[in-house]
Amino acid sequence: GELPIYCLSYSNFTLDDKNTAYTVAECKKLSIGLVIIDSLTRVHSADENQSNSMSAVMSQLRAYAAAGIAVLLIHHHRKSTQSSGGVSQELRGSSDILAAVDTHLAVRRKSNRLIVTQSKQRYDEELEPFTLDVITDDNGFKFEYIGDSVLPEYEPEVQIGLKVLYLLGKLVEANQKRLLEELKQLSISVNEHSLRQVLDTMVRDKKVMRRSGKANEKI
């Protein structure tokens, strides 16, 4: 049979303890296993560029997962620029958003064609980019799989930045020495100087945060 779909529309709904507890309880009562939130920016009032603020927001979503409820979260990317390159770096806001999710899929639209790129998959291998066509007729619409999509080659510094975000998604935080070791294990050609330049740019663009660790070691 057809699966039931429930819609909840509140003009002032925010992800806080009260609303999270209520919606989790309703999901359990109705045997709902998937919650779709459209979009992230509509359900919080935090500063998306602040790591601590977004960590608190994302922790509310983990309450759904802890209750056995999957969450599909829609979030917008920055407008793509020549320097931004990969989809991970185009994700708007703090790097805590990407670090908190298990899977990240980016969808780009060109006319009636969608290009889907996976930049993170915590528990399995990442999918290769693929293309879908949106087919519409009098009965509605459907997606038709076209095949694999080829991504452009990125500049070396962009490649390093993409892998740094990938590693932080797994490690949450790491010092520069640890990142350098991990990058070399991924066969990324990088030295301490080039990594520091990339990190400086990422900090400036608020893609990552830097704080002092032991003996003022920058991380």
Image (tube, helix red, strand yellow):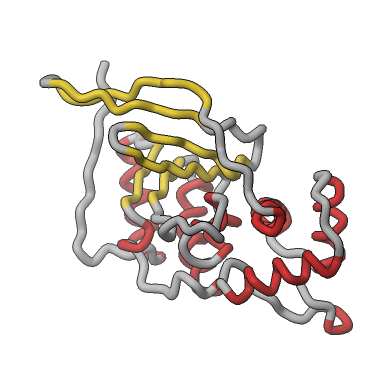
Of all residues, the one furthest to the bottom in this rendering is 216
Total marks shown come to 0
Q: At which x and y percent is residue 109?
A: 35, 40
Q: From the viewer's perspective, is 110 left or right of 161?
A: left
Of all residues, the one furthest to the top in this rendering is 1
Most foreground residue, 45 or 193? 193
Q: State which quarter of the image contains the N terminus.
A: top left
Most foreground residue, 173 or 87? 87
Q: Is residue 204 above or below residue 54?
A: below
Q: Where on the picture, by quarter, is residue 113?
A: top left
Of all residues, the one furthest to the left in this rendering is 138
Q: Is residue 123 above or below residue 20?
A: above
Q: From the viewer's perspective, is 173 left or right of 25?
A: right
Q: At which x and y percent is residue 208?
A: 62, 68
Q: At which x and y percent is residue 8?
A: 23, 49
Q: Where on the picture, by quarter, is residue 219?
A: bottom right
Most foreground residue, 68 or 134? 134
Q: Where on the picture, by quarter, is residue 137?
A: top left
Q: Is residue 52 above or below residue 17?
A: below
Q: Who's the residue at 81% across and 45% down the image? A: 186
Q: Who's the residue at 53% across and 50% down the image? A: 87
Q: From the viewer's perspective, is 31 left or right of 81?
A: left
Q: Who's the residue at 72% across and 64% down the image? A: 173
Q: Who's the residue at 57% across and 63% down the image? A: 96
Q: At which x and y percent is residue 133?
A: 34, 26
